[in-house]
Amino acid sequence: MKLKHIEIFNAIMLSGSLSGAARLLHVTQPAITQTLQHAEMQLGYALFTRQRNRLIPTAEAQALYPEVIKLVSQLESVRRLAKALQAGVQAELRLLVVPSLAVRALPDALKRFQRRYPALNVSIRTLHSNEITESIALREGDVGIVYGTAQHPSVQTVPIATGRLVCVSEAPKAAAHRPTASTRRSTVDLAEVMRSGCIRINERDPIGAMLAELCARQGIASSDGITVQTHHIAMVFAEQGFGPAIVDSFTASATTSETLEVRTVLPEVPVGVQALIPLGARSSKPATDFIEAFRSVVNAA
């Protein structure tokens, strides 16, 4: 199948008709019909049958479609990268940040940054770490801030800070006050927290995956509990009394709760924060200065 055949096939699968595919691709319906016929002639079998003015995919088309989706996604990535390269120097600083670090660390870093660049436009998107890595590789952002170490051939990492996993939970009622420095240095055993049905991060998150691997390595079984996508949401649930939550120390430092207890998880699990920039691209001075501002804020916290 040629690329134009794949494009037409995908459009018909999405719209369910020749006219719908023509509208999606901004071409005439006869052009769609002709290209589909050519594709079927090359393949040697039909891709669709007609039922009541709709095109129904054949078994062969249904088998092909998952692979076509992958290819269409890759082609879209190429288009997005080509567009980003065409744009050249951006008129704004584009930041991609994981949600938990956008709650407190990002605003504090932006305050420092904007003292030096008060007139520079800043675009902010919150995404998960793997999405940020992919977007930076496609040059859809100038700086990405993620947890863990990004492994991508088109991305360069810049270390920001190293924290650790902590357990956040409601303090006992008799001691309902904001945790003191000594309370923050207290510890809790990982096995104890996991047995209590703690709130934890989904395993598709780098830290969630790291925690699951550690539990498996140490033979720690977990009871049923709540699984969420972001560290900040886990901490909010803990604040609302749903149980203890395992989050990173950077997220825990952003709490405004007067009754939340923060304890280091043992064995200690290091949590790294990295800045990502496109590999081979010369970072602008604003991008470099933002990374430094973010590093200062996170390390201070």
Image (cartoon, rainbow, N blue to C red):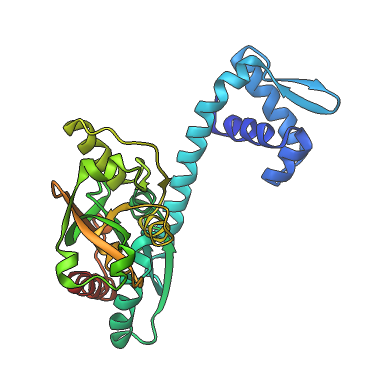
Q: Position of residue 128 (x, y in %)?
A: 38, 52
Q: Which of the 4 image quadrants contains residue 122?
A: bottom left
**Which residue is rendered at x = 28% and y = 69% of the image?**
175
- Vertical comparison of 163 with 93: above or below: above
**Which residue is rendered at x = 34% and y = 65% of the image?**
173
Q: Position of residue 3 (x, y in %)?
A: 54, 33
The image quadrant where one finds the N terminus is: top right
- Vertical comparison of 70 with 132: above or below: above
Q: Position of residue 201 (x, y in %)?
A: 35, 47
- Vertical comparison of 242 with 71: above or below: below
Q: Is residue 99 left or right of residue 270?
A: right
Q: Is residue 79 left or right of residue 160?
A: right
Q: Position of residue 226 (x, y in %)?
A: 42, 45
**Visible residue check, residue 152:** no
The image quadrant where one finds the C terminus is: bottom left
**Visible residue check, residue 65:** yes
**Nearer-the-camera pick, 189 or 30:** 189
